[in-house]
Image (cartoon, grey):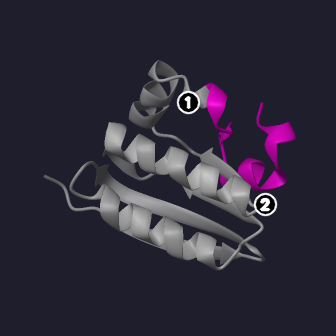
Amino acid sequence: MEQSVVSVDRIGSAVVVTPHGEIDAATTPALRDVLLAVLADRPTALVIDLSRVSFLDSVCLGALVGAAGRAALADCTFALANPTPIAARLLAITALDRALTVAPTITEALAGPASTR
């Protein structure tokens, strides 16, 4: 199994979280912890860059949906960006690509939902 790493970058008052590798039941708790810590700092926007994800499962999707809900409660814009083909396929199969904002780039995700739909 591939190791997962999560990087966090601040862009002004927004935060970009980039998970790397396989995000599954074993690695999602670390991602969830990062997302909760980031949201506790009350950014104006939270973007999850999926460009480095080689695999994700339903546990990861649940964490992303949970983070989106927490972001909404905190008045924080939430978006997914740069999904790999594997991630894009899973988002489409589960219809999360219609429930969540998904942008082709981080720049477009930070620009807001109007530019991504």
Q: In this figure, which residue is indicated by the disc labeled 1?
A: 96
Callout 1 environment at 10 Å: few (<14), some (14 to 19), or many (20+)? some
Three-letter code for the amino acid on which mark 2 is drawn: Asp
Percent x, y for residue 93?
45, 20
Q: Which corner quadrant holds the C terminus?
A: top right
Q: Taking 85 as reference, is 117 left or right?
A: right
Helix, strand or loop at mark 1: helix
In this rendering, does residue 90 appear at all? yes
Q: In this figure, which residue is indicated by the disc labeled 2?
A: 75
Q: What residue is at 66 percent from the left and 61 percent from the top?
A: 46
Q: What residue is at 55 percent from the left and 30 percent from the top?
A: 96
Using the rendered view, name the quadrant where residue 29 is placed: bottom left
How far apart are the alpha carbons under marks 1 and 2? 20 Å
Residue nearest the observer in this picture, 63 or 3: 63
Three-letter code for the amino acid on which mark 1 is drawn: Leu
Q: Taking 37 as reference, is 77 left or right?
A: right
101 shown above or below 26: above
The magenta stretch is 98-117
The circle drawn on residue 35 is: none
Q: What residue is at 51 percent from the left and 66 percent from the top?
A: 35
Q: Earlier in the sequence, mark 1 or mark 2?
A: 2
Residue nearest the observer in this picture, 56 or 26: 26
Helix, strand or loop at mark 2: loop
Residue nearest the observer in this picture, 57 or 11: 57
Residue 19 among those drawn in magenta: no
27 shown above or below 59: below
Q: What residue is at 42 percent from the left and 53 percent from the top?
A: 52
Q: Taking 40 as reference, is 26 left or right?
A: left
Q: Which residue is farthest top?
A: 93
> Do residues under tags 1 and 2 come within 8 Å of each other at their CB atoms?
no
Percent x, y for residue 87?
43, 36
Percent x, y for residue 90?
42, 28
